[in-house]
Image (cartoon, rainbow, N blue to C red):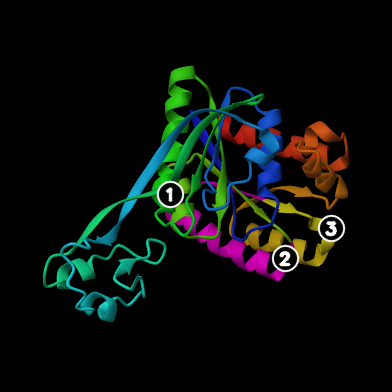
Amino acid sequence: MKEIVVLSGKGGTGKTSIVASFASLAQSKVLADCDVDAADLHLLLKPKVKEEKEFWSGRVAFIDEEKCTECGLCQELCRFGAIKDFEVDPLSCEGCGFCYQVCPVDAIATKDSMSGHSFISETKYGYLCHARLGIAQENSGKLVALVRQNAKLIVERENLDYIITDGPPGIGCPVISSLSGASLALLVTEPTLSGMHDLERVIGVCRHFGVPVLVCVNKYDLNEENTYRIESYCGSEGIEVAARISFDNVITEAIVRGLPVVEYSNSKVTQQIKELWQIISAKLEK
């Protein structure tokens, strides 16, 4: 089993559109959407949920009204402002447990928090493992790990070859959780100053975890000078730029119709994405 993770140092570079096209092109694979804070791969793949589970992680405080003497000490000391009128706001509570420690009458306790849901779904392209983090909830790194574990179990059960993961943007905990142990990282960037800066940061994360890297410059023709600078930087770092993908409104049209662009149009962009998948397949087979 080989796992490819599609990442971007910033949001909006087009990685989900590329993953959706890979879903159409690749055989013998499981798909995983690890952008649990803002999952959107399901919008293009139209999954039918087969299994849904609650995700419990972290703890929140609650006050026993019968024991509480309303001394106000917890309200005064909570630095997150989560306690008002002797009630705990679960959206503001960070679960630090300090109020539990300082309460003089032991009226405060902590309980597990239901932070989201994980899903195993079927699509016309195969299984999709995805999740939804609750509003104002944290621990997305743990939820990403659960999504990846679900995908690996399906690969082993069905004897499949690939996991194709739509990773989260940035370089934080969810990225680390989606990247560690992967076979290959495809970094999707765009020829903007922010795209170039964040590409350098995510390359550093990949190197830290020893994951091989390929780079794809999306919308390269919006600024060919910056594209050249990205390619020069990657060349100096020994990183292969596997593809240039043109800016084309056909991608937006495909999204509006809820289709991967490789199914919507036989355009230049479609050919570029197909060539990119061929390069990735060859890398994974080595």
Residue annotated with mark 3? 221
Q: Is residue 61 left or right of residue 115?
A: left
User: Per the image, is 93 magenta?
Assistant: no
- The answer to whether residue 208 is seen in the rendering is yes
Image coordinates for residue 149, horizontal then vertical, percent? 41, 35
Q: Label 2 belongs to which residue?
A: 229
| Residue at screen point 32% across, 77% down | 79
> Which marked residue is nearer to the observer: mark 3 or mark 2?
3
Q: Amino acid at mark 3?
A: Asp
Relative to the observer, which residue lies in front, 242 or 178? 178
Q: Is residue 121 left or right of residue 52?
A: right
In this picture, residue 134 sits left or right of residue 90: right
Q: Up-down: is 208 above or below 284? A: below
Question: Which residue sits at x=17%, y=64%?
Answer: 107
Please report the bounds of the magenta region as a residue range: 191-215
Q: Amino acid at mark 1?
A: Ser
The residue wearing badge 1 is 177
For the residues carrying marks 2 and 1, which lies nearer the camera in this image?
A: 1
Q: What amino acid does circle 2 point to?
A: Arg
What is the distance, in whole Å, between disc 2 and disc 1 at their CAs? 30 Å
Question: Per the image, is 202 magenta?
Answer: yes
Residue nearest the viewer, comparing 265 with 280: 265
